[in-house]
Amino acid sequence: MMAGVKATIKLAWYYKIIALAALLVLAAVLILPACSTSYTLKGDSRPLHHTDQGFRNLYVEKKESSFFDFQKMRFFGEEKWADYEGQGNLVESVKVDIQQLRNPADSPQFTWIGHATVLVQYQGVNILTDPIFGQRASPFSFVGPKRATQPAITIAQLPEIDFVLISHNHYDHLDQYSVERIGNTATWLVPLGYKNWFKDLGVSKVIEFDWWDERKIGVTHITATPSQHWTARGMNDRYQQLWAAWSVQIGDLKFWFAGDTGYNDKQFVEIGKRLGPFDLAMIPIGGYAPRWFMQDMHVNPEEALQIHHDIKATLSLGIHWGTFPLTAEPIDEPLKKLLEATASLKETAFITTPLGKTTTLELDNTIAQKK
């Protein structure tokens, strides 16, 4: 009996070592950065979030944790790491109404496609956020975090996309598979430092924004806002590209897309004062465990609810959960914790929707009607 237990423990460690070895090979491949050299302003008058090496957060200290630190925690730490294998059925989904996407009503509508990918539609403008339609959040098709749930629709089923918002360059937010297939059919709105990466893929319809840059294109008014996060696609390009959240106004609709972020009590309050209130906000609720490692850069549901209030959102949608096994929490825990947080505060304006569900906003009374 004891011999069998010892053999099982020994085998578990063997698999951990094999997995870590594979990841070290992956790390070696990733030493060359996959994005272009960053663009930062020089001199004393430059914005505070610009540095000589790239960019920085203003309200949290930069930590020197590395790829190897993460893998050590992941494979050899004491925290129990959730297994998403076969757990996708815990995330509710419905069949997308393609006809409603291609012929929307007069009211604004939004559809959660998966992870941080949301389609927002109003007045003939179709906006897609952080599209990831690939099977892995990884530079490779054969290794890396694999989807537990599929995108609600395919790229081919999308209506014609006018704008794509990119929050940052992590593989679960900037997906090469999706970029290559959407290509120049849409205009890509990105933070500073991404144009050359897109250019290498043959995509030229790209507009870079610094925090608080704004631009009006047709009826769409776009502003890049601060968030608290970081960037890297390789081993030596950390913080060289900027990260951002996005404020978008189309007629009488104003919405905000967070992408991925940690919490501070300064920037989101400022966003609310300068640009709020928002009819709709898309705020991450997953990717937060273990807290001692993730807290600075990833909000939990309680902090997401605080952002909802800070930016003065009328309705918020919980995103960035139920898709990729990137962090330690179980696949459906973000939803449960959000329900606990909103129930304790008798809060009804922060919701989640099933994958594929299209929700219509009535702006006159700001009531979300699920159809």
Image: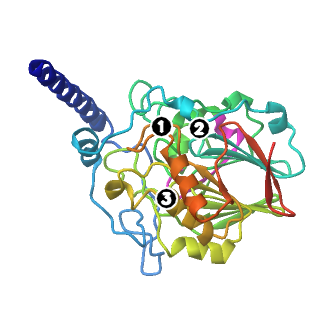
Q: Residue furthest right?
A: 106
Residue 283, x across and y down, in percent: 58, 56
- Local crowd at mark 2 within 10 Å, few (<14), some, or many (≥20)? many
Which residue matches tag 2?
179
In front here: 41 or 162?
162
Tell me the number on the disc at residue 235: none
> 83 left or right of 98?
left
Answer with mark 2 or mark 1, whichever residue precedes in sequence: 2
The residue that label 1 is drawn on is 324
- Which residue is rendered at x = 59% and y = 71% of the image? 310
Disc on the earlier residue, 3 or 1? 3
Magenta-drawn stretch contains 346: no
Q: CA distance from mark 2 to mark 1?
A: 19 Å
The answer to which of marks 2 and 3 sits earlier in the sequence is 2
The residue pinned by badge 3 equals 261
| Residue at point 67%, 29% (across, down) | 154
- As helix, strand or loop, the secondary structure at mark 2 comes to helix
Left-right relation of 354 to 220 = left
Highlighted magenta segment, given as a residue range = 182-194
Give the residue at x 80% y 38%.
Answer: 101
Depicted 362 relative to depicted 109: above or below: below
Q: Amino acid at mark 3?
A: Thr
